[in-house]
Amino acid sequence: MKYLCQVWFDGRVLSALSQEEKNKLGRDSLAYDRDLADSGHMIVAQALQSPQSAVTVRVRGGEMSVTDGPFIETKEALGGFILIDAKDLNDAIRVAAGIPLAKLGAIEVRPIHEFG
């Protein structure tokens, strides 16, 4: 089964890290991605730019509106994702627990809905 591991964290926590801590987090994250690829779990992983770079698109009554920036006021924002292939939810949870940013934020694990 495929699972999406959404990486949520408070950007202020990352900003408070020293450059050395940020570099280590980056190295650890890339190393974990390689481990997931080697184990056959990795499908794709991507980091996202800051929420301030986002736009929100809505269509209501046939009319499109676009709003700059994130829509929701929240401390945590989606910072990235890892799409994995796992045997079951327990395997996906084990994989998510190893994501280095789980120590600073939260990892939401959600099964992918397969159509057809």
Image: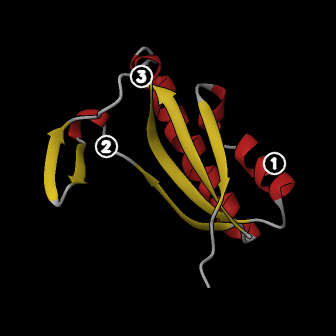
Q: Which mark is residue 49?
A: 2
The answer to which of 92 and 116 lies nearer the viewer is 116
Query: Where's residue 62, x and y in %?
Result: 17, 61
**Are the residues flagged by discs 3 and 2 in contact, CB closer than 8 Å?**
no
Query: Where's residue 38, x and y in %?
Result: 71, 68
Query: Where's residue 114, x and y in %?
Result: 63, 75
Measure the alpha-carbon separation of dots 1 and 3. 27 Å
Quick one: quadrant of the N terminus? Answer: bottom right
In the image, residue 38 above or below residue 76: below
**Are the residues flagged by discs 2 and 1 in contact, CB closer than 8 Å?**
no
Residue at which label 3 appears: 74
Query: Where's residue 39, x and y in %?
Result: 76, 67
The mark nearer the N terminus, 1 or 3, is 3
Which quadrant of the view contains residue 72? Answer: top left
Q: Amino acid at mark 2?
A: Gln
Query: Which tag is nearer the camera, tag 1 or tag 3?
Result: 3
Helix, strand or loop at mark 3: loop
Q: Residues within 10 Å of mark 3 (few under 14, many from 20)?
A: few
Residue at which label 1 appears: 94
